[in-house]
Image: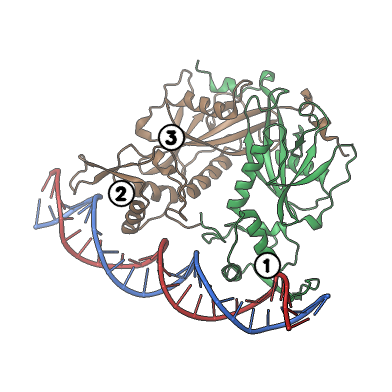
Chain colours: A green, B brown, C blue, D red
DNA sequence: ACAAAAGTGTTGAGAGTACACCCATGC
DNA sequence: GCATGGGTGTACTCTCAACACTTTTGT
């Protein structure tokens, strides 16, 4: 049955759907890539871990909804937040028709404290390799977010968001190794990073470094995430 | 005001929204990259050109909705269809709160006939460089789709979807040049394509070629769109 | 014969990759 | 003095980019 395009374009309460946002918040903790999960305290999936998220309100954009949900969990001021994908399977939510727009975000663990929650539910970091059973299709969403992150560190400066303002080159390399889940050559990595001209030598040294030679501390020349014209920072795709 | 996560997770009619899909259907016609537009015959934007699209129904996935809308315009059997981005600005639609999930699709112009429309509205191909004034934020959606397409032909075999089953190498090169909007070196292009091992020599020749040497006809080894491990087919990013 | 597109190799530059040793510090 | 991570250079390979002429056909 062919339908008239403009009939469909007419507002119609029958066709209204619930729309949520879900945010995959990444950080690096204890040399592992981790995501923030919250424990549900209602049906469906009561007691199960899930991504932080919630309904999009009438008067806010979808991006604003994602940011708001994020702020309810963390004391973030500025985060890197990027839309990922919209999951729209009719039976992805047992309560009925709920479409979710997924996002991912990156923070430096030390710069943010998890907000003390006003209710009894918990929020906790889980290494991406050790996820618990998750509500809805949230495992798929995390897998998708991880793929996006792994691709994107190769041609953008996105990785910076996970690091403190000043950092040693070895810390940057470690972040790449953790996200890509592979060892990288130290000399080639440093050569590449330096020739990209995205690093600034702060002149400072890492003081707490333990029984070894102190490392130079660098910062990034651009505050914002930059798309590099180069073919890739580390791993070619 | 902090809200309880699980309160937000509860279904609530107040928070129901309208969700549409919009499809940017690309093809190559008369040596130009073109998109299919339909003329609106209702308010808002009555008489203005817009992307084919419509509301997501209760019982179909968002992907299915996009496919259905596409099939209402074209006699497609199999199309390459990929989700693009979700546009969720609260005032992107003057009728009220409508979120749209955008898609893009690629077809070979000769393989598909536009479906004769049952209503009086028109559907027409427009070169992407010569778009008319568009309804809603559809110009942004097309711009976004074009960027995605331009990136993606560099590391996938997506471009094949625009060509007939059998084609000359120069036709493939032309498709790349049209999409990227730049000239490419013939020898380097052919060398690259051949060493990717994605082309099969059909043994046939182009017969209607006019007053010039007949071109070999090739086909693709994989029917499906393939992600190449290489660093890029043509233009490095 | 001539117009028009098809087809074909080589060279130089730059980027990627592999690889091993000395340095500065805390204990 | 020794354990720990910080810091450095070179040689080989491979890919990319630039570039011009001959071939085959229709008219």
Q: Which residue is pictured at 89% across the width and 36% down the height? A: A120
As drawn, is B30 to the left or to the right of A46?
A: left
**Where does the image place residue A135, in percent across and percent down from the top left?**
72, 33
Q: Which residue shows up at 66% across the image and 57% down it?
A: A159
- Badge 2 element: helix
Task: Pinpoint the chain carrying mark 2.
Answer: B
Q: Quick one: B62 or C21, which is closer to the camera? A: C21
Percent position (x, y) of residue A185?
58, 66
Whether marks 1 and 3 lie on the same chain: no
In this view, D26 is above or below B183: above
Label 3, on which residue? B125
Secondary element under disc 3, as helix, strand or loop, is strand
Percent of width and height locating residue B6: 82, 32
Checking the image for residue A170, the label placed there is 1
From the viewer's perspective, tell me whether residue A41 is left or right of residue B185.
right
Q: In what element is the residue under mark 1? A: helix
């Amino acid at each position: 049955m062919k339908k008239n395009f403009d009939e469909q374009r007419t507002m119609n309460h029958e066709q209204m759907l619930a729309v949520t946002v879900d945010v995959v918040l990444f950080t690096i903790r204890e040399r592992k890539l981790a995501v923030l999960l919250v424990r549900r305290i209602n049906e469906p999936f009561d007691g199960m871990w899930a991504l932080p998220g919630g309904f999009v309100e009438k008067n806010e954009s979808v991006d604003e909804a994602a940011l708001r949900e994020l702020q309810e969990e963390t004391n973030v001021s500025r985060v890197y937040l990027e839309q990922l994908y919209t999951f729209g399977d009719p039976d992805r939510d047992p309560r009925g028709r709920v479409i979710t727009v997924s996002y991912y975000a990156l923070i430096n663990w030390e710069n943010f404290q998890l907000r003390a929650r006003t209710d009894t539910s918990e929020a906790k970091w889980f290494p991406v390799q050790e996820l618990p059973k998750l509500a809805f299709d949230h495992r798929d969403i995390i897998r998708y977010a991880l793929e996006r992150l792994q691709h994107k560190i190769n041609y953008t400066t996105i990785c910076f968001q996970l690091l403190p303002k000043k950092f040693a080159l070895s810390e940057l390399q470690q972040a790449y190794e953790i996200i890509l889940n592979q060892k990288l050559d130290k000399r080639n990595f440093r050569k590449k990073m330096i020739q990209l001209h995205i690093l600034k030598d702060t002149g400072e040294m890492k003081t707490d470094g333990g029984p070894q030679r102190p490392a130079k501390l660098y910062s990034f020349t651009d505050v914002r995430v930059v798309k590099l014209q180069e073919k890739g920072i580390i791993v070619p795709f």
